[in-house]
Image (tube, rainbow, N blue to C red):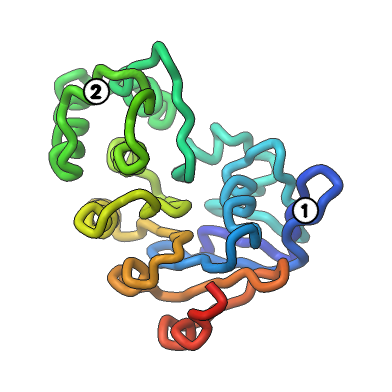
Amino acid sequence: MNLLNLKKFLIKCGEKIILQKSDLEILPGQRIALIGANGSGKTSLALALAGHPKYVIVADEFKLFGQNAQELKPSDRACLGLFVSFQNPCEIPGLSLYDFLREAHKAKTGHCIPITDFRELVNSSMELLGLDSKFLYRDLNVGFSGGEKKKLELLQLLVLQPRFAILDEIDSGLDIQSKDLIKKVIEKRSADYPDFTVLLISHDMGLCESLNLDFVYRINNGVVEGHFSWHEQKRITHEI
């Protein structure tokens, strides 16, 4: 069963059509990159899949985890296992990172695990990312650098343990050493859950190559094109 099935879909924002009719299929366990020029619609696609009300998907078929996704609210999609990282995570004064993670985990799983188990999960995840535990008691994303915010997105992935992660330029703002953490996080989640699926939106071909991608999709003139193998993709690098 396909994890994501989009048949003859387009994406609209108000009356504006952002992506023309295309097809997109993703299988469990695949690692796929989505490439395209700035402003081509990559982030719009990510947000539309997450259920952002501003972006509407019109499709002959739109199934996520085998269910009719048009009937699923953003929270439903998240509970089923969808995770979308943000290019520019919002700041929420008054809400600590720890409380956010605790409530998000409870909402996603439907139950509240013992505090000791949750702290072990959070602490091991922060250790993998090289994050100081003091970050847990700071307001969510408030006063954090761009790189730190991206690490907090990866922390959420590790804590929420999704089946399908869409990483929207998660490497932006990270130095070379920190970019290695992206691969570590993906490998960690894949080890825990072999069917873990990744759709990576990135301009960094070095990062893409290190992840042993299965396929590459590209957005060209408002149309999603694929599947390209990694070797085929190298011939279109100039279009990224």
Of residue 52 and residue 175, the one placed in the foreground of this image is 175
CA–CA distance in space, label 2 to label 1: 40 Å
Compared with 24, 71 (above or below) is: above
**Amino acid at dot 1:** Val
Read off the residue under disc 2.
136
- Residue 77 relative to residue 213: left or right: right
Image position, residue 149 (x, y; %): 35, 37
The kind of secondary structure element at disc 1 is strand
Q: In this view, does 71 lie to the left or right of 43?
A: right
Residue that label 1 marks: 58
Q: Where is residue 97 in the image (x, y as percent from the top left)?
A: 32, 23
- Crowding around mark 2 (Cα neighbors within 10 Å: few <14, some 14 to 19, many 20+) is some
Give the quadrant of residue 73.
top right
Whether residue 176 can be seen here: yes
Mark in the foreground, 2 or 1:
2
Coordinates of residue 240 in the picture (x, y in percent): 53, 72
* Image location (x, y in percent) of residue 44: 63, 51
Amino acid type indicated by mark 2: Leu
SS at circle 2: helix
Considering depth in this image, is 123 or 170 the residue closer to the camera?
170
Answer left or right for 173 relative to 37.
left
